[in-house]
Amino acid sequence: MANTLQNFSSHYAVLFTLLFLLTLVGAGEHHRFSRSLSQAKHGLKKEKLSHLRFFFHDIVSGRSPTAIRVAEAPTTKNSSTGFGAVVMMDDPLTAGPELGSKLVGKAQGIYASASQTELGLLMVLNYAFVEGKYNGSTLSVLGRNTVFSTVREMPIVGGSGVFRFARGYARARTHKIDMNTGDAVVEYNVYVLHY
Ligand SMILES: *[C@@H]1O[C@H](CO)[C@@H](O)[C@H](O)[C@H]1NC(C)=O
Ligand SMILES: *[C@@H]1O[C@H](CO)[C@@H](O)[C@H](O)[C@H]1NC(C)=O
């Protein structure tokens, strides 16, 4: 009798262990896709507004250009606006207007001629900063740049590092352009909300 009871309980122990293991396996298969978080606990307490000012050097001539044409349409050369040309840039950003002044980052990305009636560029790029607390952080720009307008405004659509959740705008004003080479220095004033 005692033996039967013992057998009975040991069978139960085996059964419960099995059920427990199955539960564990089941839990392993459950992947949570989304959840709500507390903004404050995630370090997002107070949104701040920052102003950045720098000079963008677009060097298309010489032995080491920082912007190079990578594609064009069969009709690009016949277009007065270079419609269809695509340029890849890794343009230095400096604190002052001289190329030799302090490097604060690079503008890395693409500009492409997107208008058939004026010089209107599609700008798709990241500012990759190297200066101080901004080192390693980026801002992403997606905008329209009519380069012969006095001031052009482009949206800042996001960022990384200290610029997580960034939004804002960049105002560009040509500082200097060499009409022979096409090399240009552009002053940028960037206004960005971030945490
Ligand atoms: C470009 O213009 C030239 C001269 O007008 C013409 O001969 C040529 O066919 C044109 N090319 C294209 C791709 O339209
Ligand atoms: C920026 O960060 C990189 C990688 O951590 C480091 O090598 C570099 O020296 C830093 N630059 C500046 C200007 O602090």
Image: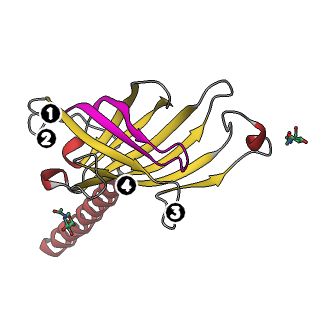
Which residue is labeled 2 in the image? Answer: 42
Q: Name the residue under label 1.
A: 39
Q: Ligand 2 sits in which quadrant?
A: bottom left
Identify the residue position indicated by label 3 in the image: 62
Q: Find the distance from the CA under tag 1 to the CA under tag 3.
A: 50 Å
Separation of residues labelled 2 and 3 (CA atoms): 48 Å
Q: 102 or 30, which is in the foreground? A: 102
Looking at the image, tell me whether mark 3 or mark 4 is earlier in sequence order.
4
Q: How many marks?
A: 4
Disc ID at residue 152:
none
Tell me the element at label 4.
helix
Which mark is nearer the camera, 2 or 3? 3
- CA–CA distance between discs 3 and 4? 59 Å
**Distance from the alpha carbon under mark 1 to that under mark 4:** 29 Å
Q: In this view, does 57 lie above or below 194?
A: below
The percent coordinates of residue 58 (x first, y second) are 44, 49
**For mark 2, does the 10 Å Cα neighbourhood hold few (<14), some (14 to 19), or many (20 or more) residues?**
few
The segment highlighted magenta reads: 167-195
Closer to the camera: disc 1 or disc 4? Answer: 1
The kind of residue on which mark 3 rests is Gly
Local SS, label 2? loop
C-alpha gap between disc 2 and disc 4: 27 Å
Please say if the residues under marks 1 and 2 sit with CB atoms less than 8 Å apart. Answer: yes
Answer with mark 2 or mark 3, whichever residue precedes in sequence: 2
**First along the sequence among labels 2 and 4:** 4
